[in-house]
Amino acid sequence: MVVLANAALIGGLIEVCREAIAANADHLSELDRAIGDGDHGINMRRGLEAVYAERNRLAELALPKALEEIGLTLVMSVGGAAGPLYGTLLIAIGRQLGGANGQQDFARALEHAIDAVARRGRASPGDKTLLDVLYPVHAEVVRRAGLAGISEQAERAASLTFGMRAMRGRAAFLGDRSIGHVDPGAKSCALLTAAICRFLEEQCPA
Amino acid sequence: MIPKSANVGIVIVSHSPLVAEGAADMVRQMVGDCVPLAWSGGNAVGGLGTHAAGILAAIERAWSDAGVAVFVDLGGAETNSEMAIEMLGEPRSGKVIICDAPLVEGAVMAAAEASGGAVLARVVATAQELSP
């Protein structure tokens, strides 16, 4: 069960996401060197550090507003393609959850936000992007798979990008040569999903 | 200082600060300072890349009520430019167009058109004629 009502979780979520990226930044850049411009880990780390620096202020906000502001911080600090994509995801989730009474169904907000990311990047599932993790994660959320199930699915989905041919981003220029590498955006997305799931599980054991 | 102009503004966005600045130099040589012009190149820490905050600042610098035409190189430049335009907010965001045109040639042609007082749609169309 994904719990989203507790604003006190914000600080912790920021912390585990920052740790997940910091611990894997070199690996993400290495993946990006194979099919992109080699800076995904550095860019993501810069973004998460910027969010971390703001964590006390962000933790004071209601969750929808906090997500929106975290998204904006990522846009302003990550750069590349990842900044606008992750930023769009969080801003859209925040805006959707923040509507009316703030109690909207999380799965619907997530779906709406993932669609916004797809439009922003003009990408579809199967194009070897972070969408190839986000849509499976959403499917697991919809079928209430549980946090461990969501996390496992995210990791599996990221590894499946290994066999895909990139259709968007710098990797698309490589054509068939992009096959045989895990997409760095899909990987960072899986790492963040796993970190969030692990944290939520610790906070709210079943 | 660029005098306040009624002409359409031009913004150049490249992953490379050198490319962005160089293209802007070429535009400046063509049209002098009668067209508002700004560039954004590189990521938030000056390395290769693009970032929305820098692009947003460039659009502000090149702002004209007649609108702004933006020229971009590779994919992330376009995505970040779209994000920057959204952050500009309405109604100004409606007056900024990302051109589907080559960066250098597009910017120079657009600037030449803009320097004659053409409206935004005309400036953009002139640049986009360069695309196959």
Image: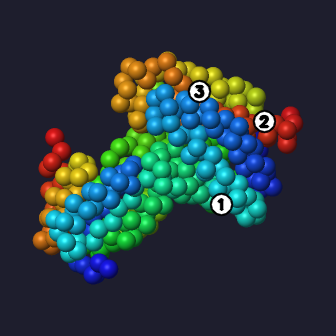
Instruction: Name the spot of residue A73 as percent of width and height, x first.
Output: 59, 57
Single out the mark in the foreground, 1 or 3: 3
For the residues bearing labels 2 and 1, Cβ distance under 8 angstroms: no
Residue pictured at 56% horizontal, 46% vertical: A43
Task: Say which quadrant the C terminus of chain A sits in.
Answer: top right
Label 3, label 2: how far apart the Cα atoms are: 17 Å
Q: Mark 2 is on which residue type?
A: Arg
Label 2 chain ID: A
For the residues bearing labels 3 and 2, Cβ distance under 8 angstroms: no
Evaluate whether residue B28 shows in this view. yes
Instruction: Name the spot of residue B58 as percent of width and height, x first.
Output: 39, 65
Residue A65, label in figure? 1
Mark 3 / mark 2, whichever is N-terminal: 3
Q: Which residue is mark 3?
A: A158
Label 1, label 3: how far apart the Cα atoms are: 29 Å
* Left or right of B21, for residue A50: right
Instruction: Name the spot of residue A119 as percent of width and height, x first.
Output: 43, 44
